[in-house]
């Protein structure tokens, strides 16, 4: 085992967003040897993307949040933690050997404790025409604005639900993009459902102030807002040209060059699923989340999950999550006793509750409607293998009960994205088709490698990349 | 598909090659950003239907942006930063005139 271990450390943190940065900084401050592995070129994650490099003043940033990101990066660099940027984890073996691909070269770090801080991905919401070039996630446009200072040319429509939809719409409009309309699924029913959560949410007025500022920006730029839509489709020859929305009993057609879609974010499932951590279906969030305790410890006591990857709470909650997981890891590794853990975690747990106060209201208000999460037959669900919702329903009628069986019948989830995009949707379709709970349907069995790894890189790994996969009994 | 903002801080030009065409990117661009600004769309064609595809997520999850980079296939263009002289190939079906 040890001869193929490139490095050994106390804690490996996967991901350098708010949770990962806070976890690494805190774990290092408690005397642990820490290594952070992050896919991006510099720490920050999706929310504080590239805060320390590049185009300041390009896209409108959101002030205090942006500064917060810089503080986290500064603290991380000032700590004793080692950061590996541009590095992708493609496997974790049962002995916590973390296999990393960086610049085409693979290496392994052996961890005593693992903190998974891989954040969230935008929920995929298949609808007819969403595979056309010109249809993108709203978050994708934000990445392009913030890292390359570019905006979609031509007419832009944003569709779906959630705070990010409004944020990106206002960012793009402020930057000079021609944002024609924001089309939301959110309507009167959602506002009514969310109402009970409002008093607690109002305890964090800063959240509302930000949201109102985005809405003011949209009004200022003359962006049309259409609410409570009941259907969504894109059409065009070779690329998107029109978006069709159902409003009440009418259909509206809007000419577009770019259609940006968003329906909230869900925990990035890959690493937690690869390690066979226990998950539960969160019906409020319509998503899977790994089962963790108050400290973020998963069903594997050597593994913690912190931040949005454990359940969506936003950047500030993720930060406190990261620090809590680090303190708990220090306890797990014998660096501090339970009393010290309790003392250090108490203020963080209180802070975390405060940051989460807005979630019940937000989650209820921006819950994607059934027609969006359980798409029509014609919609392609698995983009890698071109499998439609109708094909998945037809195998469900044959008695297929789970995503892995559906994969064997239809190839859905078999492509290079390994179900990252379609996983949650396939669970939902199968559960609703059979009239059972999503928990009874389950999820894809995720296998290594998580990303394509050149054979040469594996061969040059110490030990020849001969990684046994004891979960399946075979070699990778 | 995308256009560079006029007021953006100027970064050094990076010249790459996409299917034999000269594409001028900016330092720090991901390959996907450079291709979207240059109009190199689609990025690929569906292996099953032949339908054109372009990036969906830009965070490395969807694999819709995969292209060949300097001879290595299936690289996610959104996770690759441009370097001078980079040679990029789209699948034959995705190239202009295909």
Image: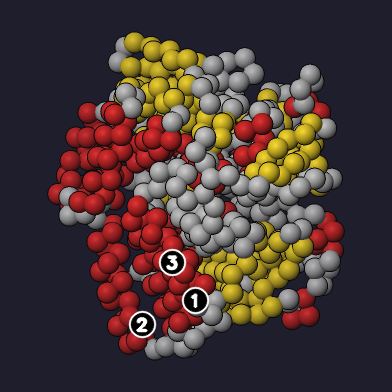
Contact (CB < 8 A) between labels 2 and 3?
A: no
Q: Marks 1 and 2: which is nearer the front?
A: 1
As measured in the structure, the alpha-carbon distance from the residue carrying label 1 to the one carrying label 2 is: 23 Å
For the residue labelled by badge 3, is the local secondary structure a helix, a strand or a loop? helix
- Residue at the top extreme, as displayed: A250
Quarter assignment of residue A386: top right
Nearer-the-camera pick, A278 or A190: A190
Residue at mark 3 = A72
Please give the name of the residue rendered at 35% of the width and 60% of the height, measured from the top-left corner: A316
- Could you say which disc has been placed on residue A78 in the image? 1
Earlier sequence position, callout 1 versus callout 2: 1
Could you tell me which quadrant the C terminus of chain A lies in?
Answer: bottom right
Please give the name of the residue rendered at 59% of the width and 56% of the height, measured from the top-left corner: A40
Please name the colour scheme applied to the rendered image.
secondary structure
- How crowded pointer 1 is (Cα within 10 Å; few <14, some 14-19, many 20+) is rated as few
Nearer-the-camera pick, B33 or A97: B33
Query: Residue A317, relative to residue B15: is it above or below?
Result: below
- Could you say which disc has been placed on residue A105 in the image? none
As measured in the structure, the alpha-carbon distance from the residue carrying label 3 to the one carrying label 1 is: 10 Å
As measured in the structure, the alpha-carbon distance from the residue carrying label 2 to the one carrying label 3 is: 22 Å
Find residue A445 and report its horizontal and vertical position in percent: 61, 51
Earlier sequence position, callout 3 versus callout 1: 3
Could you tell me which quadrant the N terminus of chain A lies in?
Answer: bottom right
Residue at mark 2 = A341
Please give the name of the residue rendered at 40% of the width and 43% of the height, measured from the top-left corner: A60
Earlier sequence position, callout 2 versus callout 3: 3
Quarter assignment of residue A29: bottom left
Contact (CB < 8 A) between labels 3 and 1?
A: no
């Amino acid at each position: 085992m040890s001869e193929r271990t490139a490095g050994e450390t106390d804690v490996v943190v996967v991901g350098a967003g708010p949770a990962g940065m806070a976890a690494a900084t805190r774990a290092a401050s408690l005397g642990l040897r820490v290594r952070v592995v992050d896919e991006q070129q510099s720490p920050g994650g999706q929310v504080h993307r590239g805060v320390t490099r590049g185009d300041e003043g390009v896209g409108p940033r959101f002030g205090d949040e942006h500064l917060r990101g810089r503080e986290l990066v500064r603290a991380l660099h000032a700590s004793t933690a080692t950061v590996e940027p541009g590095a992708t984890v493609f496997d974790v073996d049962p002995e916590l050997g973390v296999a990393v691909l960086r610049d085409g070269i693979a290496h392994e770090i052996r961890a005593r404790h693992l903190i998974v801080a891989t954040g969230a991905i935008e929920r995929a919401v298949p609808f007819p025409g969403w595979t056309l070039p010109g249809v993108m996630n709203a978050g994708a446009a934000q990445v392009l604005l913030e890292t390359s200072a570019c905006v979609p040319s031509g007419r832009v429509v944003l569709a779906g639900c959630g705070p990010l939809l409004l944020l990106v719409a206002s960012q793009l409009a402020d930057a000079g993009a021609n944002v024609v309309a924001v089309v939301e699924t959110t309507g009167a029913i959602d506002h009514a459902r969310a109402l009970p959560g409002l008093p607690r949410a109002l305890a964090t007025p800063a959240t509302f102030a930000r949201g109102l500022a985005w809405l003011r920006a949209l009004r200022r730029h003359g962006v049309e807002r259409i609410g409570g839509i009941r259907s969504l489709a894109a059409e065009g020859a070779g690329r998107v040209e029109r978006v069709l929305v159902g409003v009440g009993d009418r259909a509206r057609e809007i000419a577009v060059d770019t259609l940006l879609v968003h329906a909230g974010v869900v925990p990035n499932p890959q690493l937690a699923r690869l390690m066979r951590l226990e998950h539960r279906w969160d019906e409020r969030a319509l998503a899977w989340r790994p089962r963790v305790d108050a400290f973020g410890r998963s069903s594997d006591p050597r593994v913690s999950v912190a931040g949005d990857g454990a359940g969506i709470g936003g950047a500030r909650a993720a930060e406190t999550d990261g620090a809590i997981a680090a303190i708990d890891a220090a306890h797990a590794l014998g660096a501090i006793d339970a009393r010290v853990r309790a003392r250090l975690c108490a203020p963080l747990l209180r802070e975390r509750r405060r940051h989460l106060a807005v979630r019940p209201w937000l989650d209820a208000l921006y819950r994607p409607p059934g027609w969006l999460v359980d798409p029509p037959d014609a919609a392609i669900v698995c983009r890698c293998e071109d499998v439609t919702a109708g094909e998945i329903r037809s195998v469900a009628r044959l008695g297929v009960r789970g995503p892995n069986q559906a994969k064997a019948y239809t190839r859905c989830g078999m492509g290079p994205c390994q179900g990252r995009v379609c996983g949650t949707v396939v669970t939902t379709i199968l559960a609703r088709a059979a009239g059972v709970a999503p928990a009874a349907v389950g999820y894809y069995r995720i296998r290594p490698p998580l990303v394509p790894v050149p054979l040469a890189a594996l061969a040059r790994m110490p030990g020849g990349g001969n990684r046994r996969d004891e979960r399946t009994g075979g070699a990778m | 598909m995308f256009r560079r903002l006029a007021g953006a801080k100027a970064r050094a030009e990076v010249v790459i090659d996409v299917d034999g065409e000269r594409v001028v990117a900016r330092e720090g661009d991901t390959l996907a950003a450079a291709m979207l600004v240059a109009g190199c769309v689609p990025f690929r064609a569906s292996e099953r239907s032949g339908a054109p595809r372009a990036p969906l997520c830009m965070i490395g999850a969807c694999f819709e942006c995969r292209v060949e980079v300097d001879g290595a296939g299936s690289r996610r263009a959104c996770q690759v930063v441009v370097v001078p002289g980079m040679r990029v190939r789209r699948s034959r079906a995705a190239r202009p005139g295909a």
